[in-house]
Amino acid sequence: MTILLVEDDDILAFALEKALTKSGYVVCHASDGNSARQLWQHHLPDLVLLDLGLPQRDGLSLLQLMRQEGMTTPVMILTARDGLDDRVTGLDGGADDYLIKPFAIDELFARIRALLRRSPASHPRLQFSDLIWDPQTRTAYIQGEILALTPREAQILEAMLTNPRRSISKERLIALFNSWDKNPGTNAVEVTVFRLRRKLADFGISIETVRSFGYALRMQDDTTFP
Ligand code: CA
């Protein structure tokens, strides 16, 4: 599960990111409203933790914009503002829950789990032949066994399986990596695809390079491609 953490207080953000990562969530962090919007669009997170007072674009305006753009991601507002008006405005603006700072980490986790349980239908398992991706647990299975993947390999596999044609442009993968990792290196995508390709090869699945586009999943014995 990927959580987008939008928080401009570096100390709080660091502590939350550490606690969430330790609990098995994949966290991407934005410290202003505009980069939060970009990460939201690129990562399609399962949940957003949203501070309201942010540089560049405040949390409420970001939330309204993302809802207008059709993003249905569950959103929990985290803010020190404890006025009733702010709560009502936040919920009217499309938030699903509201937590007042300071809060106990256990309460945050309980509310995260509750929010994620409410939207299971939006995270169906993805499948290609014997390969299954479970977005709830961010686990890949092949022929019923867990396929061990690095976070980057998982990101690529999920992106490919999310596309109905099981293909993805290289540009989109580079954008994913850039927002995930500040310095991914120019050939990070090629290296990761190479490793993922080796892991899948034993199971009859290949990742084809599609010239001037990117990559596509196919069965090794399928000759009808593209
Ligand atoms: Ca703030």
Image (cartoon, helix red, strand yellow):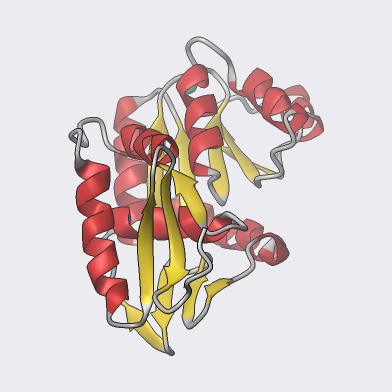
Q: Which of 49 and 64 is in front in this view?
A: 64
Residue shown at the point (27%, 37%) measured from the top left: 181
Q: Which of 49 and 163 is in front in this view?
A: 163
Residue shown at the point (64%, 28%) measured from the top left: 82
Is residue 1 something one can see in this rendering?
Answer: no
- Position of residue 198 measured from the top left corner of the image (x, y, whole percent): 23, 69
- Most extreme residue toward the top is 56
Q: With respect to residue 173, does 65 lie above or below?
A: above
Residue shown at the point (36%, 68%) measured from the top left: 206
- Position of residue 217 measured from the top left corner of the image (x, y, whole percent): 45, 63
Q: Number of callouts in the render? A: 0
- Position of residue 33 measured from the top left corner of the image (x, y, whole percent): 52, 20
Is residue 163 something one can see in this rendering?
Answer: yes
Q: Which of 107 and 134 is in front in this view?
A: 134
Q: Along the horizontal axis of the image, is 225 left or right of 92?
A: left
- Position of residue 126 measured from the top left corner of the image (x, y, whole percent): 57, 69
